[in-house]
Image (cartoon, rainbow, N blue to C red):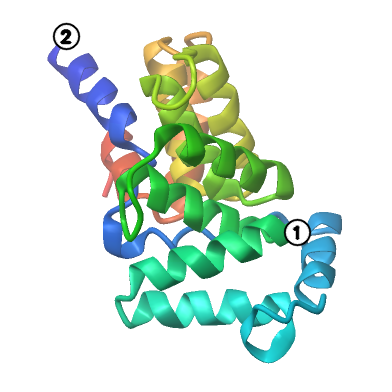
Amino acid sequence: MVRLFWMLAWLSTAALPTAASAATRAGNTQPGQKADAEQAVQTRADTQCPSGTVKGCVDAAREAEQKGDAPRAATLNTRACDAGVAGACAALGEALATGYGVSRDDAQAARRLQRGCDLGAARACTTLGTLTWQGRGVKADPARAGKLYLRACDGGDATGCFSAGICARTGTCAPRSDAKAKKLLQRACDGGETRACSALGGR
């Protein structure tokens, strides 16, 4: 029972980033056609972005984040997300979910994260899964949360694999399967998610 409690506690916070890492951890996009499409988006002209392209907003948002100017980063990520940059939507959604540089707004966070997830940012799928698990900004739906975690895992996000593994181990947001849980947790551990390594009883 104690072990289950800690597993659920891990799951409830699995994807919510610390404020300082909201933007830098959110840009992992899926390879292939979506990545090519995003590259094309970033070359589009936008006179309201530095250097006159969408990429200028993306780069300036990253620079603002590194300098600790979270409000400017959020403004630039809003512009880039509206243009269709997956990582910008993920960063903006996480900022809205944590109140980092903007007023916290769970409903807006969920919408931005959904857009980022659909555009290919695996991290956005993970964070949206946690909001869905918690019922923040969207109706609480553990089964949907589990599917979002799997989608994130398939997109290469180790935290998504960890969360999906906990779902499978506990049966709270996916059919219970120790074998599937072990496989997912191993993927997460191999991807650098140390909590997954601990859950496996390893390093």
Which residue in the rendered view is the most extreme toward the bottom? 51
Q: Is residue 174 above or below residue 31?
A: above
On the picture, is 21 further left or further right than 26? left
Q: Residue at x 33, y 43 (%)?
A: 104
**Marks 1 and 2: which is nearer the front?**
1
How crowded pointer 2 is (Cα within 10 Å; few <14, some 14-19, many 20+) is rated as few
On the picture, is 39 further left or further right than 179? right
**Residue position marked by numbered label 1 in the rendering:** 31
In front of the other: 73 or 199 = 73
Which residue in the rendered view is the most extreme toward the left? 2
Q: Residue at x 51, y 43 (%)?
A: 187
Q: Is residue 24 visible?
A: no
Q: Is residue 144 above or below residue 131?
A: above
Q: Is residue 170 visible?
A: yes
Q: Specify the amino acid type for callout 1.
A: Pro
In front of the other: 15 or 74 = 74
**Mark 2 falls on what kind of element?**
loop
**Residue position marked by numbered label 2 in the rendering:** 1
Locate residue 71: give its quadrant. bottom left
Q: Specify the amino acid type for callout 2.
A: Met
In front of the other: 5 or 23 = 23
Locate residue 76: give its quadrant. bottom right
Discs 1, 2 touching: Cβ within 8 Å: no
Q: Is residue 3 above or below residue 90?
A: above
CA separation in Å, label 1 and label 2 = 40 Å
